[in-house]
Amino acid sequence: MEHFTLIDGALHCERVPLERIAAEVGTPVYVYSRAMFEHQADIFRAGLVDAGIENAHLAYAIKANPNRAVLAVLARRGYGADVVSGGEMQRALAAGMPAHDIVFSGVGKTRGELASALDVGIGQFNLELEEEGEVLAAIAAAGGTSADAVLRVNPDVDAGTHAKISTGKAENKFGVAIDQAVAMYGRLAALPGLNMRGVAIHIGSQLLDITPLEAAYTRIGQLVAELRAAGHTIERVDLGGGLGVPYKAGDVPPSTAAYGTMVARVTRGWNVQLMFEPGRFIAGNAGVLLTRVIWVKPGAVNPYVIVDAAMNDLARPALYDAWHDFVAVRPNGERMMANIAGPVCESGDTFAMGRDVDAVKSDDLAVFRTAGAYGATMASTYNSRALVPEVLVDGDRYAVVADRIDPATILAAERLPDWLTA
Ligand SMILES: *Cc1c(COP(=O)(O)O)cnc(C)c1O
């Protein structure tokens, strides 16, 4: 399903020309397709249902794209949320996601975050260490309540993805060592104030190969059997997120059908409610970053196409050497070899080097594709640039769903101490 297409020679999001959004909202701007979020949400569920997995709990990992309009779209599709901070919890609740459908993950939940999540009746805490469980149990017991929790386990599996988005190797900061899980689970389950429901894993992001997921799930199945043998009732297993999306030609992620079939096979007989936390899969290809070419600057080898989007708007290339396709909004059929860079004063503010792209010139519009996940949410105002706005398209209409926050507004939030005003 493709929702960013050429119509009469110009790139559209659904039926809205990107040229219109650029003219009316300005650039840079993130543009999202409602239909694409919905399509991805639906095929993820269908992949599981078609494989016979009926009552899965689907929690969108909202850190991928936490815009409240995006959350409202997914809430209507029956998705809960996986949140990793009190701020994300507020967003999920504001978007109408029921508290009991929210999973609270994260390696550093503060005592304040645990307490307020308990207050609002969050559905599940994914515990990352024993002390966190003890503190949560004490807060709950003091308030005369109890918290539903699962223990996040580190299965020591290499996800085969970029090191900075791998989370399931023994040396990563996430989860508890699998060989300590049974004993720790027993101690946690004995605490008043804590209802231990099962276990969780999440081994990494942008997985293009199903094998590491299968290895991790298989390992967790053994753990479930060990926990049951130790006398525990295991009702839930949270299998995390991580399914990848195509960023460039040749990226072939597993299909949702293949994923669902694998999950059904590996989890047969577990007799638990399975839980999933897809993030990138839902949002990645539902968004582009629309930008305008400022200059085409001659370079030593290739020209530099200097665009008005930068690393502060889309950090992934600088952070992870990530690839985003760069395509012209009105391609003329010609190609050029170019480097693509933003205006920020860092050599790392480079989106592509020596790449064969649509020929563009000053003032042309172009997009970085597959920018719907881990895009706007990582934006900053570095170099005193505006905070990038977001637009959601729905058929032939669109709405600005996050304002551009201009430098004057940011400046106005800063204070001069009176001993510097004289
Ligand atoms: C980031 C994260 C996810 C989502 O990962 P994707 O690769 O975007 O699907 C799911 N669960 C946890 C615990 C995470 O930290």
Image (tube, helix red, strand yellow):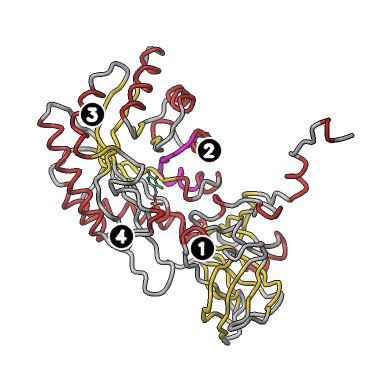
Name the residue tied to disc 3: 184
Name the residue tied to disc 1: 317
Q: Is residue 208 above or below residue 58?
A: below
**Mark found first going from the N terminus, 4 or 2:** 2
Name the residue tied to disc 4: 160
Name the residue tied to disc 2: 91
Distance between the alpha carbons at the discs numbered 1 and 2: 27 Å
Mark 3 neighbour density, 10 Å: few (under 14) some (14–19) many (20 or more) = some
- Quadrant where the N terminus lies? bottom left
Q: Determine the secondary structure under disc 4.
A: loop
Label 2 CB less than 8 angstroms from ligand 1:
no
Q: Determine the secondary structure under disc 1.
A: helix
**Mark found first going from the N terminus, 4 or 1:** 4
Give the quarter of the image for residue 16.
bottom right
Q: Is residue 74 magenta?
A: yes
Q: What stretch is highlighted in magenta?
A: 72-85
